[in-house]
Image (spheres, rainbow, N blue to C red):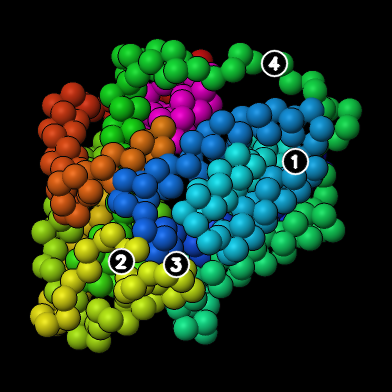
Amino acid sequence: MEHNVETETVEEKLDFKRILPIFVIVLIDLMGLTIIIPLLPLYAASFGATPLMIGILGAAYPVMQFIGAPVLGRLSDRYGRKPVLVISQIGTLVGFIMLGLASTYWMLFLSRIIDGISGANIATAQAAISDSTTEKTRTQGLGLIGAAFGIGFIIGPIIAFVSLAASDNNYHVPAFVAAFFSLLSILLTSFWFQETLPEEQRGQKEERPSFSIRAMGRAAAHPTVGLLLLLMFGQQLAFGGFEQLLALFTLSNLGLNASGNAVIFVYVGVIVVAVQGGLIGRWSRRFGDRRLVYAGLGLLAIGLLLLGFTIKQPPPWYSRAELEAELTADRALPAETPPTQNVVIDLPDDDNTGWLGLAWILAAMIPIAVGGGILQPAINSLITKRVDLAEVGGMLGISAAFLSAANAIAPIVGGALFQSISPAAPFIIWGLFLALLLVLAVQYIKPGREESEPTGLARGEAH
């Protein structure tokens, strides 16, 4: 009897030794990605890209990932996790090297396509964690992926800042640093990671029909969670667009270069990690997921509206001439005079510097980061509590699809608004859009079973 109790206790504990290689590989992969996020819009601007072209560049990765990840996921079921992880990481390495060697906008674009279409790293790593955990430890194991995301989104921009500072703001250098981390992840996968899907279990899973737009439409019409899925799409349209266009906006309004934007991204990342790493659990128990959704929509709306009305005042150290030189260094055409004619983004003048613009934008980041940090986990948690247990996995998959679709659309819409109306337009329009979503949420998302019944009963686990 004692032996059975001990066995059960062991099964309930996560095997960290088995999970650690997967966690480290995901973290290093993400560090490569997050090194270039604050840099990419400015890199493209230095080649004369318009805001719409920069938006299309931002959409290239999620669109290609949406296409490639399911294919590589099925291949990992058939041939094992390890070979698919290595292949996808090689694609990422090639993409980063091409990014570092880029001499035109189209090389940047091709690098993001290559990286995106091979970007099954996270999905395959999640499958490896599922292989390595029991039903009781799977949530904890998958939660480590979220932790890796959080840590990566802080460390990556710090590395970008350091590499830019060490290279006198050479935009090529962070891309090569990201390539180094990608190479390191390949080596770790090859020599440390142990295959988690035994050969006898490969190809055993039942073939499921490929995902379709029709499936998303049916889920959106679901009586209890359809509106929640639409909220997931709507909030990511705003928050994902904010992430993609923030560097371009701060360049235009505050004259922040790539290093300055890296610091802003670290600031936002710390707040998001604090929210998702500890605060959201307490808030969820105290107020419930439904109220958190309301709060997240309201905070994100307020923050984006504040951001849209940022005072156009560069910080005291700003020099337009130095910024123009940074944006055109090593990338100007030989016959161009002056070389800055290649940059089409309007930069602020340096006759009105001060602290107000920077203070304003840092204040706006607080409700944006808190609201954005709350919404995705709160909406997904509410979805799991309002469907039958058998539907949970499918609905979370649909939720992820809505998230991916928003990530693909947001930068294109935002770039078009930025270019055709004004740099502030995307953020003001998204802020008003979220305010409208908040009104709809309050009106139509009413208290559900989860607020009056035990969690297990609400999800049909008591039957």
Asked if the stretch drawn in magenta spans residue 120, the answer is: no
Q: Name the residue under label 1.
A: 84
Q: Do the residues labelled 3 and 2 touch (CB within 8 Å)?
A: no
Cα separation, mark 4 vs mark 2, equals: 55 Å
Element on which disc 1 rests: helix
Image position of 171 with respect to 355: above or below: above
Q: Which residue is drawn at 13% across and 34% down?
A: 436
Mark 3 or 2, nearer chain start:
3
Camera-nearest residue between 163 and 351 = 351
Q: Where is residue 447 in the image (x, y as percent from the top left)?
A: 23, 28
Q: Residue at point 47% right, 83% down?
A: 168
Compare residues 171 and 178 and report the one nearer the observer: 171
> Along the line of sight, which residue is nearer the eye, 150 or 308?
308
What residue is shown at x 74% (from left), y 34% (from top)?
Answer: 76
Q: Which of marks 4 and 1 is in front?
A: 1
User: Which circle, 1 or 2, is nearer the viewer?
Assistant: 2
Q: Which of marks 3 and 4 is in front?
A: 3
Can residue 269 be seen here? no
Neighbour class for label 2 at 10 Å: few (<14), some, many (≥20)? few
Is the Cβ of the residue at disc 4 closer than 8 Å to that at disc 1?
A: no
Q: What secondary structure predominates along the stretch shown in magenta? A: helix
Quadrant of the rendering where the N terminus is positioned: top right
Please provide the residue range marked out in magenta.
381-404
Decide which of tag 4 and tag 2 comes sooner along the chain. Answer: 4
| Amino acid of disc 3 | Leu
What residue is shown at x 36% (from left), y 36% (from top)? 409
Q: Which amino acid does label 2 sit on?
A: Gln
In the image, 294: left or right of 129?
left
Looking at marks 1 and 2 on the same chain, the residue that comes earlier in the sequence is marked by: 1
